[in-house]
Image (cartoon, helix red, strand yellow):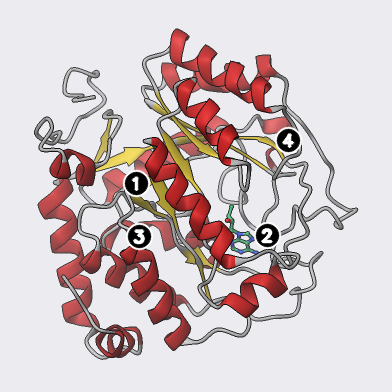
Amino acid sequence: MQLTEAQVLELLQGGDDAWLYAESARLCRENFGDAVYLRGIVEFSNVCANGCSYCGLRRQNADAKRYRLTREEIMESVTVLDREDLPTVVLQSGDNGAYSTSGIGEIIREVKSRFDMAVTLSLGDRPVGDYAHWHACGADRFLLRIETTNRGLYSDLRDGKLFEDRVKLVESLRNLGYEAGSGFMVGLPGTDARTTAQDILFLTSLGLDMIGVGPFIPHHATPLASEPMADPDLTYRTLAVLRLMNPMANMPATSALEAMEPGGRLKGLELGCNVIMPSVTPDRVRAAYSIYPGKHSHTVNTEDSIIAAKDIIRSIGRVPSASKGYSLRRNHEQQGPPRCPAGDFAGRAQECG
Ligand code: 5AD
């Protein structure tokens, strides 16, 4: 559905919540049925070279206990996912902190050769040559958020970096053949509903396979410590409007929703999200991956986090899918294989690659 900025703004201001939420839920069901895809996320290092003002992993945060998982530890987490029938792993870390380009490439190769698994990367800004190398190693997808479309704010919050450069990187990911994902934070200081409407329209214009949007949550050890958290209503409406405009995109109900308010992820699934990303970061370090407070407070360990995710899905009558959940948008555009029915955990028989 195409909407103008004025129409988006009206919906974000609560112009017609009943219609908005019914329509976004209907579109999600029409495209994905009851299936909710699970992607297990391994946060393999919190070392970060950047100084983003919103993020608890910023290099200036001396309180953060820095860690770097070994290759063996990363593979152990991937093994847990395989055992639990979660056929996508998301490898995420701080920017430029932990591994060399070739070291990450080796890990991707190992996952792809040992497991029948989709690999998603979330590793921040890197030279396009690095993205190309990892794609050649077998990585399927990449997540790189644009954070905000307000150019001045983007530079202020991200060490003077340029919004245009970030967008070019997102476009390069798609051109390299990745399934490309991006997103932004709702409620960054200095933004309002109009900024959010512009973020929604811009993000939609990128034609993304995946859209990850969550609320800004202030972190005590950052310059934005005393700023308010995002408004929950604006956050939920943003997700619903994104679903209207991007009916086929894979959209996670992010853990930031849960940090914003208990039950936030459930609400996200009810209003149009179709993905949930439990953390399988090893217990000994998961608390240290503190991008924002409360990130891991709802689950203390890997197993709980997978169980909690499946419970949330089932509690609203949906099905935790064993499918890799490749991009419907691509299948559609390339007229590829028909889309996957909702898989269940009886096995992977229903998976459609
Ligand atoms: N609150 C919410 N989300 C945050 N992120 C970083 N810091 C915060 C915060 N304080 C998001 C950014 C980043 C992603 C990994 O986490 O959008 O791209």
Amino acid found under the numbered disc labelled 4 = Val
Amino acid found under the numbered disc labelled 1 = Val
**10 Å crowding of disc 1: few (<14), some (14-19), many (20+):** many
At mark 1, the secondary structure is strand
The image quarter in which residue 281 lies: top right
**Which of disc 3 and disc 1 is earlier in sequence?**
3
The disc at residue 293 is: 2
The label nearer to you, 4 versus 1, is: 1
The residue at the point 65 percent across, 21 percent down is: 102
Tell me the residue that label 4 is attached to. 285
The residue at the point 16 percent across, 23 percent down is: 350
Tell me the CA gap for discs 4 and 1: 24 Å
**Which of disc 4 and disc 2 is earlier in sequence?**
4
Tell me the CA gap for discs 1 and 3: 20 Å
- Please say if 244 is above or below 19: above
User: Toward the viewer: 242 or 136?
Assistant: 136
**Which of disc 3 and disc 4 is earlier in sequence?**
3
Picture coordinates of residue 304, whole percent (x, y): 51, 36
Tell me the residue that label 1 is attached to. 275
**Which of disc 1 and disc 4 is earlier in sequence?**
1
Q: Is residue 125 left or right of residue 59?
A: left
The label nearer to you, 2 versus 3, is: 3
Tell me the residue that label 3 is attached to. 206
The residue at the point 71 percent across, 74 percent down is: 156
